[in-house]
Image (spheres, rainbow, N blue to C red):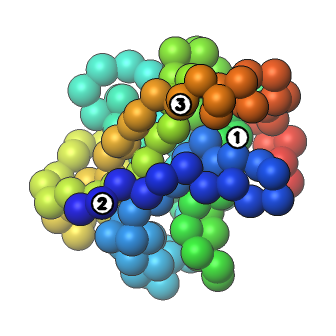
Amino acid sequence: METPAAIFIGGDMKRVLITPEANAMLAMLQEKHGRLMFHQSGGCCDGSAPMCYPRNEFRVGQNDVFLGWVGEEPNSTPFYISGPQFEYWKHTELTLDIVPGRGSGFSVEAPEGFRFLIRSRVFTDDEWNFLKDEQVLTGSQHE
């Protein structure tokens, strides 16, 4: 499986990407569950895995950082990360992927026999110089 490269849209670089396989799962899940959202917390074990929830069933915290939208229209979905976790990963491009297996927790893909996970790479110096002073949106400021 090929990891997507950084994408620039209108001068903006994406902090979070999605693989075609994860995008297909997202589309199927939205057919079943309606509009969804992702949240990446810190913690250990499955607490460090991205969780996918029905959009109105997870309350985004004031310190959660909006990384961007993942998925193709009409399935574009917001992706958040906890503020402390963002501080660790802000220099890293995240790619949402899916693999066989079941994580624990309440993420909506669990009953399908798959789980979402994050693949990452450190931004290049040029990419980081572009992003480092960018103001991030917290809470639900993007809406």
Residue pictured at 64% horizontal, 48% vertical = 14
Residue 2's label in the rendered image is: 2
Q: Secondary structure at mark 3?
A: loop
Look at the image and tell me in which quarter the N terminus lies: bottom left
Vertical side of 23 occupied by 56: above or below: above
Badge 2 amino acid: Glu
- Measuring from the top left, give residue 94's x and y in whole percent: 47, 41
Q: Secondary structure at mark 1?
A: strand
Vertical side of 122 occupied by 12: above or below: below
Q: CA distance from mark 1 to mark 3?
A: 18 Å
Residue 31's label in the rendered image is: none
139 left or right of 4? right
Residue wearing tag 1: 66
Residue wearing tag 3: 123
Name the one closer to the observer, 69 or 63. Answer: 69
Q: Residues within 10 Å of mark 1 (few under 14, many from 20)?
A: many
- Measuring from the top left, give residue 73's x and y in whole percent: 64, 79
30 left or right of 35? left
Choose the circle earlier in sequence order: 2 or 1: 2
Choose the circle earlier in sequence order: 1 or 3: 1
Residue pictured at 53% horizontal, 30% vertical = 123
Q: Residues within 10 Å of mark 2 (few under 14, many from 20)?
A: few
Badge 1 amino acid: Phe
Callout 2 touching callout 3 (CB < 8 Å): no
Q: CA distance from mark 2 to mark 1?
A: 25 Å
- Measuring from the top left, give residue 133's x and y in whole percent: 81, 22
Q: Residues within 10 Å of mark 3 (few under 14, many from 20)?
A: some
